[in-house]
Amino acid sequence: RSKRRGRGQITVFSQEIAQEMKRSTQLEQALRTAVIADAVDAHFQPIVRLQDGAVLGFEALARWIDPDLGFVSPSIFVPLAEERGFIDALSETLLRKAAEAALYWPHDLFLSFNLSSAQLMDPGTSQSILATLAQVGLDPRRLELEITETAVMTSADTAHRIIADLQAHGVRISLDDFGTGQSSLGRLRDFTFDKVKIDRAFVSQITTDRASEHIVKAIVAMCAGLDLEVVAEGIESVADAEKLTALGCEMGQGYYYGKPVDAAATQRYLQQHYGTPRS
Ligand code: C2E
Ligand code: MG
Ligand code: MG
Ligand code: MG
């Protein structure tokens, strides 16, 4: 009896695997089609100066709505594109769109763009990024690239060269999701980052959890000592913002200041907020 049940389970299990494979192949096909059709869009979320809420720049975030599958999160489709080897094509169209949108913003605002780990293992990445910027006509000094600790870990030599090359052209590098994942403080010593983004996991609990508060406080102090700018991610309330300001954090990002919206809505946001900081 137990044998039969066992066999049954195996059958169910392999059907699930088959289903899952079919789903991810379907997803991959849909995504490839979307990339070719230029249907993956860039949305933008403001990054502000905490003291007065003034907009300093925007982070580009990939958005894709498939006609059949509906909304698919970038935390699903970006890793899929990486795994299946077409992250370069996806990233290039996204950077082009994001850079084109940034041309219409006041020129003192920066564009922050996420790089995937696969791109930091590919020596051609810096050239392709600079070429896209040149084609669009966006000053490299207006670009910041967000990278994660995992990304610089896997292929450190190549990552070093890509980062140094881009920085030599004025591109700034920020370390995303700091404090989670494969965290190592050594990374801050071995790489020349310009900015650190404190992960939402700490920020979201800053008013309720003493440990999170102390961790953020320590990161802010450390960044000041290392001459790194610091951004808090995931600010959702005025209480979060006030706490972070009191801890000396300079910049912030989160739903409290604005959710990611498309290029046209970003223009409207700027008309309302640029140069008229809230206080
Ligand atoms: P990330 O770079 O850490 O981006 C921040 C994520 O937090 C975004 O999720 C953003 O919408 C979300 N977020 C911002 N403020 C708040 C808040 O106040 N509360 C909450 N709950 N969430 C907030 P999203 O857009 O789903 O992106 C997820 C991840 O996918 C990104 O994390 C990034 O790693 C990746 N990603 C997105 N777009 C791109 C892209 O163009 N290229 C690459 N390589 N990765 C991307
Ligand atoms: Mg990011
Ligand atoms: Mg982040
Ligand atoms: Mg994240």
Image: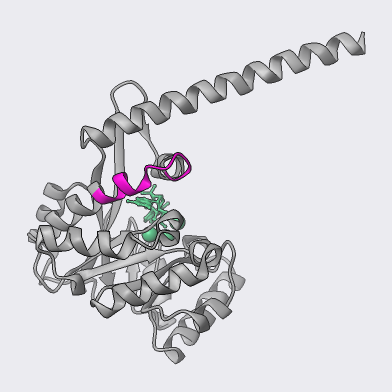
Residue 6 at least partly seen? yes
Tell me which corner region of the image, top left, top right, bottom left or bottom right, holds residue 244: bottom left
| Rendering coords of residue 274 (x, y %) | 12, 67
The number of numbered discs placed on residues in the rendered structure image is: 0
| Rendering coords of residue 277 (x, y %) | 16, 72
| Rendering coords of residue 51 (x, y %) | 28, 79
Asked whether 148 or 155 is in front, the reply is: 155
Tell me the chief SS of the magenta region: helix
| Rendering coords of residue 143 (x, y %) | 23, 68
User: Image point 46% across, 79% down: which residue?
Assistant: 191
Asked whether 102 or 203 is in front, the reply is: 102
Asked whether 207 or 23 is in front, the reply is: 23
User: Image point 47% across, 61% down: which residue?
Assistant: 200
Colour scheme used in the picture?
one colour
Quarter of the render that holds ligand 2: bottom left
Is 252 situated left or right of 156 in this image? left
Is 21 situated left or right of 50 in this image? right
Tell me which corner region of the image, top left, top right, bottom left or bottom right, holds residue 141: bottom left
Q: Residue 59 in magenta?
A: no
Q: Is residue 39 above or below residue 122?
A: above
Q: Which residues are magenta?
A: 82-92
Residue 278 at least partly seen? no
